Image (tube, helix red, strand yellow):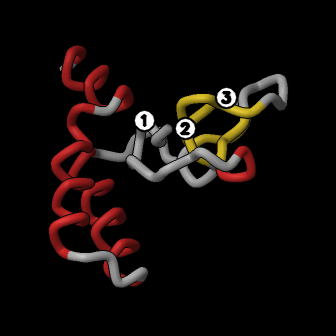
Amino acid sequence: MFCQSCSMPIDDAGLRGTEKDGSKSNEYCLYCYVNGAFINPDMKLDEMRNIVKTQMEKMHSPPNIIQLSLDSLPNLKRWREKTKTT
């Protein structure tokens, strides 16, 4: 299970964001989504790419894994929906 905003694995319930009713989100991580809303609702895809790349580099992720994550972003729910409306 991956966050549908940043692609971070969210298999651990402690990493999941929260819905308005306080339940855990099945789609988004706690870094992207709290109380049923995105933490940064106006974020653009390119901004997310920069954040993901920076965080993965800090974790010393292999370059090919970083690239896979970056390539997956436009296909995630948050970004697919934005491209449909723009």
- Horizontal and vertical percent for residue 31? 58, 54
Position above or below: 70 against 65 = above
Q: Amino acid at mark 2?
A: Tyr
The residue lying toward the viewer, choosing from 44 and 1, is 1
Between circles 2 and 3, the one closer to the viewer is 2
Earlier-in-chain disc, 2 versus 1: 1
Earlier-in-chain disc, 3 versus 1: 1
Q: Are marks 2 and 3 in contact (CB under 8 Å)?
A: no
Look at mark 3 in the image and give the residue it sits on.
Answer: 36
Badge 2: residue crowd in 10 Å (few <14, some 14–19, many ≥20): many
Position above or below: 49 against 40 = below
- Horizontal and vertical percent for residue 70? 21, 54
Look at mark 1 in the image and give the residue it sits on.
Answer: 4
Q: Amino acid at mark 1?
A: Gln
Q: Are marks 2 and 1 in contact (CB under 8 Å)?
A: yes
Q: Say which element carries label 1.
A: loop
Q: Could you tell me which residue is drawn at 50 percent across and 38 percent down?
A: 1
Look at mark 2 in the image and give the residue it sits on.
Answer: 28
The residue lying toward the viewer, choosing from 44 and 60, is 60
Q: Say which element carries label 3.
A: loop
- How far apart in space, not on screen, are marks 3 and 1 (Cα)? 14 Å
Q: Say which element carries label 2.
A: strand
Q: Could you tell me which residue is drawn at 16 percent across and 67 percent down?
A: 64
Q: Amino acid at mark 3?
A: Gly
- Horizontal and vertical percent for residue 37? 61, 32
The residue lying toward the viewer, choosing from 44 and 28, is 28
Q: Could you tell me which residue is drawn at 21 percent across and 37 percent down?
A: 74
